[in-house]
Amino acid sequence: MTIDTIEEHQARAAALGQRLEGSSPPEILEAALIGAFPGRIALVSSFGAESAVLLHMAAQIAPDLPVIFIETQRHFAQTLDYRDALIAALGLRDVRIVEPAPAEVAAQDPQGDLWRRDGDQCCTLRKVAPNQRALAPFAAWISGRKRHHGGVRAALPIVEHDGLHYKINPLAAWGPKEIAGYMRANALPAHPLVAQGYPSIGCWPCTAPAAEGEGMRAGRWAGQGKTECGIHRPAAQRQQAF
Ligand code: SF4
């Protein structure tokens, strides 16, 4: 048996992504769930401001799809309530709630203030490592990132390979108008913090409302010079952080 190199995986991801460029998000999801990676793919969701769209699409195609929620133990209570309400409303049957390893938390964050001292290490402990463990059985995962979020996401491909997994980004080309239209058309409930000025929602210590005219993710790690948690870094860079 030959093992494909990372370059071969990346070339395959690029070819699939090019083929799917211009397809609708449900078409992209179907191509991934049924065509390319049946039984070998999961969706990672933060149950945040825009998450209902992708979760609803996935539930229409495969309600048994494994959905991974990273329980950082720093979520807003509203997010946990919203998660449970969406699971029930959409009929999601395999939501996997994954937590940081207790021994790692005890060793690295005994006072629970790591987010204040070292946000990158806190994200590695509470998000990156649990996500990587949860994804170990899968060949591919689905993310809800979008190009309109800007920063490194502006050039987001439809399909990529991060050195360990294929990643599918069905909503890459959608903007706020399409997201809002889909929410309305399918009567999807909004995350309760959206009405309080939070366009993007993560952990409570690192999420603030965004002012009018600011970018979607302006309230994430505001003033810290940090824009991403690290789960989307190439695998080799994540390993260095462990
Ligand atoms: S977003 Fe903040 S609280 Fe959450 S894991 Fe990262 S640094 Fe820690």
Image: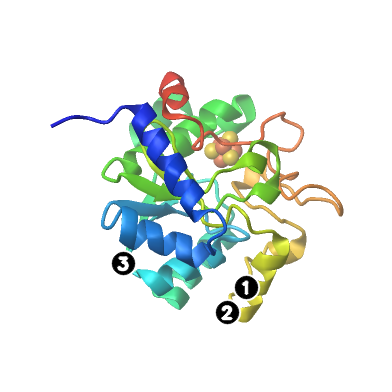
Q: Is residue 61 visible?
A: yes
Q: Quadrant of ligand 1?
A: top right
- Residue 168, visible in the rendered structure: no
The 10 Å Cα crowd at callout 1, few under 14, some 14 to 19, many 20 or more, is: some
Separation (CA) of disc 2 from disc 3? 20 Å
Location of mark 1 (residue): 183
Coloring basis for residues? rainbow
- Alpha carbons under labels 1 and 3: distance apart: 22 Å
| Residue drawn at the location 29% of the way across and 46% of the way down | 138
Side of 66 relative to 113 (left or right): left
Disc marking residue 186: 2
Residue ID for mark 3: 64
| Left or right position of 182 against 56 | right
Q: CA distance from mark 1 to mark 2?
A: 5 Å
For the N terminus, give its image quadrant: top left
Structural crowding at the residue carrying mark 2, measured as other residues with C-alpha within 10 Å and reported as few (<14), some (14–19) or many (≥20): few
- In this rendered view, identify the residue nearer to me: 234 or 4: 4
Task: Assess whether mark 2 and mark 1 are in contact (beta carbons under 8 angstroms).
Answer: yes
User: Please, what secondary structure does the residue beneath circle 1 have?
Assistant: helix
Total count of labels: 3
Q: Amino acid at mark 3?
A: Asp
User: Please, what secondary structure does the residue beneath circle 3 have?
Assistant: loop
Q: Is residue 211 left or right of residue 75?
A: right
- Dividing the picture into quadrants, the one containing residue 240 is top left
Disc 2 residue: CB within 8 Å of ligand 1: no
Q: Quadrant of residue 104?
A: top left
The reply to whether discs 2 and 3 touch (Cβ–Cβ < 8 Å) is no
Instruction: Name the residue type under label 2.
Output: Asn
- Residue 15: image location, x then y, percent: 44, 43
